[in-house]
Image (tube, rainbow, N blue to C red):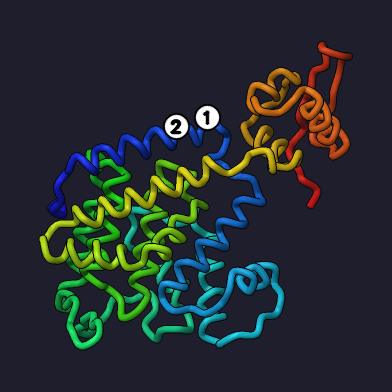
Amino acid sequence: MKPPYDITPKILRLITDISEKIGEVNANYLSKQSPQLRKQNRIKTIHSSLQIEGNTLTEEQITALIENKRVVGPRKDVLEVMNAIKVYNELNTYKFFSEKSFLKAHHQLMNGLLNNAGKYRNQSVGIVKGSLVEHVAPPFENVPFLMRDLFEYLKNEDELTLIKSCVFHYEMEFIHPFIDGNGRMGRLWQTVILMKEYQVFECLPFETLISETQDDYYKSLSMSDKCGKSTPFIEYMLKVMKKSLVQLLNYNNRILKDIDRLEYFLNRGVKKFSRKDYMNVFKDISSATASRDLKKGIELNLFKSSGKLNKTEYIAHGFNRGE
């Protein structure tokens, strides 16, 4: 059974805006971000998602852990980050429609932090804020059946991926299937669902915006609880996605290095090309910059050249950054 929600004018407008922004992202070769930007955004995503849950490590400390450096901090916080690094490094291995894959991700995310990591809760839970009970989750006996229905919903190809990802996120939070780790799993799995259709969401740090608007995040969850529909949460999350895409498009592409451009270009599967072909992809660079890039590519043995001047042709022999 399809979870309840309404398609409001605001939702329609946001979906249109997001679709346009994704078109711009693809047109500006940002769907596969540069290694520098990917790493930067991955750090922001991990930091923001765990900060919402009370983790105290800074972006600098997370960067150090990614680079296998020693970090001084609370053991629990360090373990949370190490687990998250592993999970986000394996994003492409998860199947968005697979409950087994979902439970595996929870096990990896909460390993060493929770005795029953990767398993649904076997006790009743509620969310208390101050002296008030904010939310009472469904009985634990119902969790396996509710989650099974939710994963069946994910297989519905008639649903828009943008909507489906928000609905899953909200419904999972409502079911609260785990003793701990529900918030980070909801945000993680929304990314996994979005990546199926839009690769840009792999490293798009919309969790940073959730962290910055945390009160609105929880308010939209609460409003959805009260009206019995995920509509307020869908509106909130679509707004966050749009802002994240706008931020990506505002990123100054000119700080991309020559090796980033070369990697992007060659990863498109190009075998033979001219300088003109290269500049047709990177429309903002000068012919002199393009010539320097191509010279660098030859020096790195990424491709060889034949011909002279404007008749020069470049032939790729397999991309290897030599790192």
Left/right of residue 64 with respect to residue 231 in the rendered view: right
Nearer to us in this view, 103 or 13: 13
Q: Secondary structure at mark 1?
A: helix
Left/right of residue 59 with respect to residue 156 in the rendered view: right
Disc number for residue 247: none
Left/right of residue 139 with respect to residue 189 in the rendered view: left
Report if residue 172 is visible in the image.
yes
Nearer to us in this view, 125 or 320: 125
Residues packed near mark 1 inside 10 Å, few (<14), some (14 to 19) or many (20 plus): few
Q: Which residue bears the numbered disc 2?
A: 23
Q: Based on the displayed image, in which of its 4 quarters is residue 160 positioned?
A: top left
Q: Secondary structure at mark 2?
A: helix
> In the rendered image of this protein, does residue 263 appear above or below residue 201?
above
Disc number for residue 27: 1
Q: Percent from the top left, x then y, of residue 289? A: 79, 29
The kind of residue on which mark 2 rests is Gly
Q: Percent from the top left, x then y, of residue 179? A: 31, 81
The kind of residue on which mark 1 rests is Ala
Q: Residue at x 87, y 14 (%)?
A: 309
Residues marked 1 and 2 touching at CB (< 8 Å)? yes
Marks 1 and 2, how far apart at CA: 6 Å
Q: Percent from the top left, x then y, of residue 195? A: 43, 47
Q: Residue at x 24, y 85 (%)?
A: 130
> In the rendered image of this protein, does residue 254 appear above or below residue 221?
above
Q: Residue at x 84, y 39 (%)?
A: 300
Q: Percent from the top left, x then y, of residue 47? A: 52, 68
